[in-house]
Amino acid sequence: MSESMNLIDQMADLQLNYYQGPGHLESFQSGAKKLREAFASGLTIGNANTAFYCAIQGTWFSLASGEKDLTSLLKQIDYYLHLLGTYKSEMTKYYLLCFRETISILIDKGEATGIDDKLTQEDVSNPDNKLLELFYFHQTFRNFWLGYTERCQHYVKLFLELKQPRYYDMYIFKFYQGKFSRWNLFSNTV
Amino acid sequence: MIDMLKKRRVYSRSEQVDLLIESMRTAASHAGANFKHKLELLEAEQFGVDNYPQKAMAAYDAAIASAKEAKFIHEQGLACEKAGFYYKRMKDMQKSWQYFKQARECYEEWGSSFKVEFVQRELDRLQQQQNEQLQPRSIYW
């Protein structure tokens, strides 16, 4: 439709708006692919800001769906971080560093793949900080896969106490919450 | 007043789980590709805890098949891992071994060395148990 209406220049904006809203109902994997295309399209027309938001949303879809293996995803994030040397954006950098650390932890607990640059609790200590949602989400995700039940529940609780969490799919949190609610007595893993 | 009472209602753990499964059912009905296998995995765990082994086994298999179909390799691994633990609790070590082995393959494909090592430790434990059972008893017994 965007091609027939000659909206190529708005492709990145269209895809971003779609996948931050109704696109959540589609397969995360197809969303990840479309958002990578939108990233390239956004950069081509000089809309770097939107392009990097597409990159962040696409990285989330990719991680949540296992669309790419973790090593490839890590390389892709390093490529985005490399590009950020040219297109400076602190907020985007924080988001990507957080993803990077999560993926590095999932690969090998950050032993061989980790870097020093990361988002810390101090960076998000202000309750109005928009990065708080990001931080809680990633802590939940990491602790879920590491099998740290109490820590995972703790961050799920903190996330759900946020005034207007919106970036991440609430149902994924419900899955994590449900996974640990009753049957964790039987197993010490996720 | 009614709103206040509603807010104060404390759900039991079982009720909480039922509510979470219900909301996962809603998510699966709208976005099956992303949530069907998650719903089936929660149901499998629920059946396991409530002691419905046949239903639990079927739900684990359904979760694994749905995750595979949707190509959620990491959550396919998770469902296999949970099935492995379930069969271990049920003392069916052969089945447990099979599911852990599948989980390891999924995590290898996903690229998580951490999870591969975790599952490998479970496989090693099962192997050790198997070896101990096969060893001849001591003459001092």
Image (cartoon, helix red, strand yellow):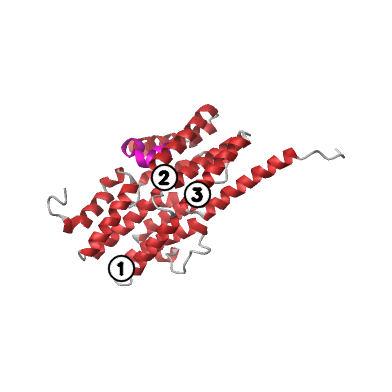
Q: Residue at x 12, y 54 (%)?
A: A6
Q: Could you tell me which residue is drawn at 49 percent across and 58 percent down?
A: A105
Q: Are marks 2 and 1 in contact (CB under 8 Å)?
A: no
Q: Amino acid at mark 2?
A: Phe
Task: Report the chain holding disc 2.
Answer: B
Overall secondary structure of the magenta section: helix
How far separated are the C-alphas under marks 2 and 1? 31 Å
Labels 1 and 3 share a subunit? no
x, y percent for residue B48: 53, 33
Q: Picture coordinates of residue A169 (x, y %)?
A: 35, 47
Q: Chain of mark 1?
A: A
Q: Nearer the viewer, residue A101 or B110?
A: B110
Q: Viewed as shown, does residue B108 lie left or right of A86?
A: right
Instruction: Check disc 3 and give the amino acid type.
Output: Tyr
Residue at position x 16%, y 52% in the image: A3
Q: Which residues are magenta?
A: B28-39
Q: Secondary structure at mark 3?
A: helix
A149 up-or-down from B69: above or below: below
Quadrant in the picture for the C terminus of chain B: top right
Numbered mark located on residue B107 in the image: 3
Residue carrying label 1: A89
> Which of the two marks, 2 or 1, is nearer to us in this view?
2
Q: Position of residue B14 (x, y in %)?
A: 48, 34
Which residue in the rendered view is the most extreme toward the left? A5
Q: Which residue is mark 2?
A: B72
* Chain of residue at mark 3: B
